[in-house]
Amino acid sequence: MSKKPSVAIIGSGFSGLATAIGLKRAGFDDFVVFERAEGPGGVWRHNTYPGAACDVASSLYSFSFEPNPNWSRPFAPQPEIKSYLEHCVEKYGLAAHMRYRTEIAATEFDERTGVWT
């Protein structure tokens, strides 16, 4: 991408990916997802301690437009949630929009132009 994108999404956890997928589904392709880690998942990529799992019923812990009927347990473990988010990146064609290993240290709003940098 040689020009600045119209939309910058910071983070590739559930919220960031939901935003990106929503933009794609609406036919909007001019966005980038910035993620400081080496892949998607947000806290589900970072929190790998023994026993890490969802505290919400797995059947409810997925996007409404992409339900996962294959959770192995009633409260999904971290590796499955991370895999689910990676699946969503692939299924919804987000790879070209992802910028991994890219930390956003600051943002600034220009009142005069109405633009974030």
Image (spheres, rainbow, N blue to C red):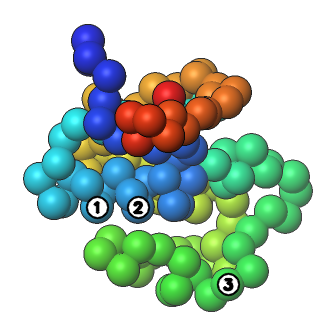
Inspect the image, locate mark 2, and give the three-letter code of the amino acid beneath it: Ala
Question: For mark 2, what is the residue?
Answer: 18
Q: Residue furthest front?
A: 112
Label 1 or label 3, whichever comes before in sequence order: 1
Foreground pick, 33 / 108: 108
User: Residue at the location (67% across, 54% down)?
Assistant: 44
In the displayed structure, would residue 76 be above or below residue 52? below
Q: Are marks 1 and 2 in contact (CB under 8 Å)?
A: yes
Kind of residue at badge 3: Val
**Image point (51%, 86%), residue name:** 59
Element on which disc 3 rests: loop
- Residue to which mark 1 is pinned: 22
Observer-nearest of 63 and 5: 5
Nearest to N terminus: mark 2 or mark 3: 2
Neighbour tally class for label 1: few under 14, some 14-19, many 20 plus, Cα within 10 Å: few
Percent across and percent down for residue 24 are 21, 52
Select label 1 or label 3 by which is in front.
1
x 44%, y 35%: residue = 112
Disc marking residue 56 = 3
Q: Circle 1 sits in a helix, a strand or a loop, which is it?
A: helix
**SS for dot 2:** helix
Q: In the image, 108: left or right of 117? A: right
Q: Position of residue 115 (x, y in %)?
A: 41, 37
> x%, y% of residue 36?
63, 30
The furthest residue to the top: 2
Front disc: 2 or 3: 2
The residue under label 1 is which amino acid type? Gly
4 vs 70, left or right, is left
Return the x and y of residue 81 as percentages of the image width and height. 58, 61
